[in-house]
Amino acid sequence: MGQEKAAVEAQMILRRRLCNPSFIFSIFSQSPDSNYSKLKYIISSSVTEASNNSVLLLGPRGCGKTAVLDLVLEELVEEHAEMVTVIKLNGLLHSDDNCALKEIARQLCLENQLLFSKMASFDDNSLFLLSMLRECGLAHKTIIFVLDEFDLFAQGKQRLLYSLLDAMQSVTSQAVVVGVSCRLDADQLLEKRVRSRFSHRKLLFLPSSREDLQRVLEHVLLLPTDSRLPQDYTATFNAKLLKLLADDKFKEIIDTLSYSDSTVGHLVRFLFHAVSHMNLNSGGFLSLEIFKAALPSLQRQPKLEGLKDCSILELYILVCMKRLEVKELESINFNSIMKEYKSVHDTFRTSDYYARKVCLRAFEHLIECALISFEDNKGHGQSVEFRPVKLLITWHELYQGLKSYNFCPSILHRLMDREGVSAV
Amino acid sequence: MMSSKVVLFFLPCILCSLIISLTLLIIFCILTDMGKEESPKFNKRTTRSSSSTTPNSKTTSEASKTTTNHTQSLSINDLIFGGESITLDKLISSFPGRRSQILELISLLGPQNSPMIPLFVYGGASTGKTNIVLQIFKHLNRPFIYCSCVTCYNPRILFESILNQLLLHSKNKSNGYLSAKRCEKPSDFINLLHEALSTLLDSLKGDLGESNSKKLSTQVNGKMVYLVFDHIELVREWDKSSIILPFLFNLYDILKMPEVGLIFLSKTSPDTFQSDPPFPVYFPDYTEDDLRQIFMKEQANLKLYSSFLDLVLIPFCRITRQIDELSAAFTPLFKKYCEPLDDLQTLPNEDTKRKLFSHLQPFISLFLNETFSVPSQPLLNASANIDRTNRKSIAKKLGIDDSSDVIDFHMSTSAKCLLISAFLASRNPSTLDASLFDSTGGCDGRKRRRKNSNKSMDQKETKAHELLLKGPGTFPLERLLAIFQCISSAAEYSSDGVELQNGYIGVEGCDAGLMSDILLQLSSLCNANFISRGGTCPLEGSVRYRSTVSEDMALKVARSLKFPLSRYLYR
């Protein structure tokens, strides 16, 4: 196997790992005080003790709530194969009670080799659910309900949550409800009758610390020594990587990355970009340059990019709007901007004075790039010229944008400087 | 008691409308059936740009292929772009200024059979997002599915279109133009999608095993399937966008199938979305150098065109850098530029360049102040050669614009009158109606307005300012009709038989007959967006209207009627 082939193979291995959250979060399964162990204890004890339970997993996106839960469930199904049935629901799909019950019935039928009827009504399905819960309780089987995006189930009348948690109050049933949500106040959204039936067990998933991120980096990026790859390639790759991970400059990059968002999910995106550019630039090894190049692609500044895409006429319009905004008029629309544009032209004799319809076109383009927007959505009958608009960028952003613009007319700089003085 | 009466009253209406809609439906079905049989089927993936890069030859071959294959079922090979694969060099050279974006996308897509996190490709209009992504798939020869949220304008159509393509289902007469699966809710969609994807992936794997032995059965590369969602920014305007958008963005996590790659194309940046979009890839606008390279492509006389671009590119780039608008402006300008030349193939020397420049000079400033309106293409021409139709219609437009006083559409006299009266009702304060439209036909109103004190001047200024901010005012239907009656009678009075050749109809004579006509005209003016129908007034409870025409337009219309509009306008 040649060097190039080995590099492609290594890239495939890394990409596969990065796209598989279970692999990434399996690193946390060893330590005894991790969320993984706590969750496993909660669920497995209620399986073995044949009791009802409910727990909420809370934390920002990308902290591995679902991945850890999947790991736990996978292991539980392996340990107690016949005793556990997992029903998975997602708030994005099943926030409607009717849909959710139908999906529960479908998955229950699938698990127990029963015939699922699409035509069954809400009532039929809920009766079916209750009888299934009873049957499973009698057979000492546990049903685990996983409710992803739990906060979305708390919209509306919360009938599903109520019927699930209410069924769990009886002695005969044997079920665990696991809610996963990125809203930390998810349990506050519940109605009183639902909240009183809910055990207030919460597991908090927090963004990782610096040490944890370092461990994840090693866990993900080090190539396995027992793969089909040539030994010498793996050895050099790993040696180079370890040297890189210890490098202070690399640590700086990771620090800047985690400054805005230190979740594992964010890190994985960053690594994915770096890994996919591995063979393009630096001959099959991960180098500092690749990571440096990956950083700006994640830390995008869409408004500044949008400003760079503007033409000079559009910059004029933005500056005119900013001037009007500083004057604190109650509302700004295209006509008042045009008045300002004309007065700017009259006082400074600029070379960029265009007809009204051309300006209107530029104005519409600005709305399209979301640098400005209409103040309300209701005025659909009004024509564009009269609808009030607002600027979506700050003075500072506009200032920065003008500075980095290549051929920006100096008059705009002067206008902005003057506004800056009066604004501050 | 009341409600039952109401129900009894409405029942016949409902029945009637039901019958009418049923018959309409049947007629429509028949019509669409006929239409489908006659018109050739277009390839599902001819986007505007892919058809323009490979004109005619491709579409005709495609059309002939689909007509012969009409009854046959589709195979996996239909999921790849088809035709010959292109090399990377050709791909990069066919998109000037997009080298880094192409390389970035290819490296993110990765080698064959490697999973990928969802991508969010964004950039302004006409920066080559869709075309580049599709051509990359042509280069890689991997199976993909393309659906644009323009044509799939609601969740149901979007879901069904994806499933149709995945299940290799084509709508035709034998299945009554039905979709393969009917699904409306995301929850059903995800189950069906899972099913469809796993069967497709299984067959891909099976095919790969086979192709190792006999090689010629398939050209499909790899066992990944990519879903491309174009114009994802439009989903924000859908009814249930708060559910659908996060659902689409999280589709990868929900599906949990590493063999599926997702690519979202959007015109707006990620921060304009409520939910977190996936990994961003940015397509910046073209720079001036890129634009020059693009415009120099496929030109007959390169020297001549480059000297033309020297003149026009920089001034036009100050207004816009969007390539579609620029090309719409440059085509007629280049024609003007070439006018003094006898032979288009001559290589220009310094002398002729100077001559051509002085010829073009006046037109540049003229065109700078024109909007580059790109006319909407008729649907059937969409996959034909677009550039040609564009050029023609612009030339036609320019011909009309020379005589700017003429309105370029036909309108009946009463509709014009209605338009003017709506304009007056929107601009003038309602308290002045009586003085403007008394028996003397507005002359008295002028006298009254002569006396100008300082105070009224101030008031006028604030009024003008208000007009600038708030736009035209609203008015009830009664006021519009009253003004309309006054205007039509006044016009008759002042022009007393002189303007009879205009085909002017008096109103007083057949009041009742005209009334329904006028209301009909009003609703058609509303539909044409000359008058907008606002919300109901909370106090009066009647619908209020607002005129949306500009003053120039109203003056033009008035001139065509020989109606003295300025005399009636309160200033």
Image (spheres, rainbow, N blue to C red):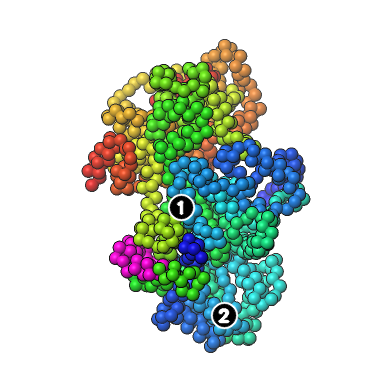
In the image, A186 versus B487, the foreground residue is: A186
Secondary structure, mark 2, is: helix
Return the residue at label 2: A77
Q: Is residue A258 magenta?
A: yes
In the depicted structure, whether residue A6 falls above or below residue B288: below
- For the question of whether residue A260 can be seen, the reply is no
Q: Which quadrant of the figure has residue B64?
A: top right
Secondary structure, mark 1, is: helix
Residue located at (62% from left, 20% from top) = B505
- Residue A394 is situated, as x and y percent measured from the top left of the image, at 32, 48
Foreground tag (2 vs 1)? 1
**Amino acid identity at mark 2:** Val
Give the prevailing secondary structure in the magenta stretch.
helix
Q: Is residue B251 magenta?
A: no
The chain to which mark 1 is attached is B
In the image, B247 versus A294, the foreground residue is: A294
Q: Measure the alpha-carbon separation of dots 2 and 1.
A: 41 Å
Q: Which residues are magenta?
A: A237-265
- For the question of whether residue A300 can be seen, the reply is yes
Determine which of the numbered discs, if any, sits on residue B300 in the image.
none
Return the residue at label 1: B104
Residue located at (41% from left, 37% from top) = B289
In the image, B191 versus A272, the foreground residue is: A272
- Residue B458 is situated, as x and y percent measured from the top left of the image, at 31, 29
In the depicted structure, whether residue B407 falls above or below residue A259: above
In the image, B506 versus B89, the foreground residue is: B89
In the depicted structure, whether residue A7 falls above or below residue B415: below
In the depicted structure, whether residue A290 falls above or below residue B265: below
- Residue B405 is situated, as x and y percent measured from the top left of the image, at 50, 20
**Amino acid identity at mark 1:** Glu
* Image-based side of A228 in relation to B183, left or right: left
